[in-house]
Image (cartoon, rainbow, N blue to C red):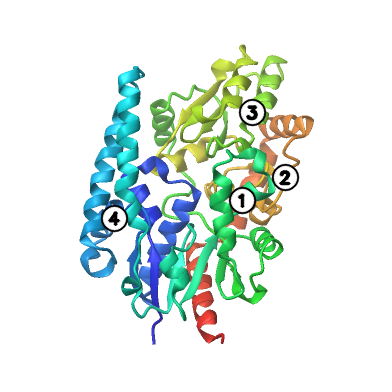
Amino acid sequence: MKPKVILDIAFLGHSHDDQSARRGAQRVASHLFDGLVESGQCELSFVATSHLAGAFDFLAGKGIAPTEKLRFSPAQLRASRLGRRLSRTVHRNLDNRSLPARAARKVLAEAARNCTRGEFRLTPAMLGNADIFHSPHTPFPPAVKAQAGLRKFITLHDFIPLKNPGYFPPGIKPFVDDVLACLTPDNFAFCVSETTRNDALNLSRIRPEHVFVTPLAADEKVFHPVNDFEKIAAVRAQFKIPDGPYFLSLSAHDPHKNFPHLIHCFGALVESGELTDANLVIVGPNPGRNPAVVAALGQFPRARSRIVVTGFIPDENLAALYSGATAFLFPSLAEGFGIPPLEAMQCGTPVIASNTTSIPEVVGDAGILLPPTETDAWCQALLQVSRQETLRVELRQKSLQRCKLFSWQRFTEATLHGYRASLEMR
């Protein structure tokens, strides 16, 4: 008999409405959704603890009748649609910095929040006779916590805000505390890496047998070697990447992604004359959110024209961008998994990455792993990969072999195993 599973698709509603919101956790939620739907091994229905309007439209776009499969009240959907319209109005007028415009945006933003607060109000009737509730990211709503007999799963991506609070604004800690409060002895968790699993066990009272590891993957349909030089050239032209070899780095512009360190290493090599023709390309949404990146760029005026900060780039362009790079650079100080290096490896791109947290679980011996703050080591690695074609060929071959260990099918199978195991426990 198929388990009855309710999946929270709030993340998918968000990324449906705003493509630039497709960060790592949203990608995981997307592949979780697709894998469970395609498996046919669950009786699936859905809720959206936020972005209900987007979730409704997302399901409709997938050919799934939201009125049948999405659990909500008509009043919640009307409020969510109004909140979305108000929020879009706010974002369309961000460039107007006048005092009246800022005041109007503040009023509209608060109205949007009031409209969407009802999205979190699941009722016991909406949960029905489900066996499993699975949140891919957010803490359990009150109705889920109170539902006796319901197996409650949450996907854990990382605990970096608790272990390294200096990397994040103070406002994020309450959210992580709420996630941690879900890790009771009766509840269940999926962790994206052994590193995250160890953190979950060390930080909570959840039972070890209730915590399952579901390693992530890179989408084979999207991330693959691109040997069409014209396509690579077209993507480079679109995003104003100068001619010549380039190093690529891709991530959100959060402080722990360590982009300033990368800029310092590259800038020093350019200004010393040791790197004469290479460029550095940094991809990621909202590049202005990290003032340290702006400050680092200002320290290397002679190298500045060779450092390209593109902002967000859609998935369909990334395989060509990865494939054309001399190497992919991932100097992150901490990760729960680390999908970008895996995407690069699947495109056959040599990888230089940090040797911290979960990153070695992903890269293994297929890349060059270095302490994330050692400037000399990173400078030497950049020079080595830039100058030694035989090393690039070796790393490219190792990357393509290593990435075969990861697939979204294995991720889905591990998730289904966790569901079944939880229902067998008493």
Which comes sooner in the sequence, label 1 or label 4? 4
215 displayed left or right of 147: right
In percent of the image, x 23 and y 69: which residue is there?
A: 68
Q: Residues within 10 Å of mark 3 (few under 14, many from 20)?
A: many
Query: Label 3's element?
Result: helix
Which comes sooner in the sequence, label 2 or label 1? 2
In the rendered view, tell whether residue 231 sits above or below residue 53: above
CA separation, marks 2 and 1? Answer: 13 Å
CA separation, marks 1 and 4? Answer: 34 Å
Q: Residues within 10 Å of mark 4 (few under 14, many from 20)?
A: many
Query: Label 2's element?
Result: strand
Q: Which mark is in front, 1 or 3?
A: 3
Proximity of marks 3 and 2: CB atoms separated by less than 8 Å? no
- Give how far across and how far down residue 342 sits, in percent: 57, 50
Image quarter of residue 388: top right
Specify whether residue 61 is in view: no
In percent of the image, x 25 and y 51: which residue is there?
A: 79
Which comes sooner in the sequence, label 2 or label 4? 4
CA separation, marks 3 and 4? Answer: 37 Å
CA separation, marks 1 and 3? Answer: 26 Å
Proximity of marks 1 and 4: CB atoms separated by less than 8 Å? no
Which comes sooner in the sequence, label 3 or label 4? 4
Proximity of marks 2 and 1: CB atoms separated by less than 8 Å? no
Q: Residues within 10 Å of mark 2 (few under 14, many from 20)?
A: many
Which residue is labeled 4 in the image?
A: 58
CA separation, marks 3 and 2? Answer: 18 Å
Amino acid type assigned to the residue bearing label 2 in the image: Leu
Query: Label 1's element?
Result: helix
Q: Which mark is residue 383?
A: none
Q: Which mark is residue 260?
A: 3
Image quarter of residue 425: bottom right
Q: State which quarter of the image contains the C terminus.
A: bottom right
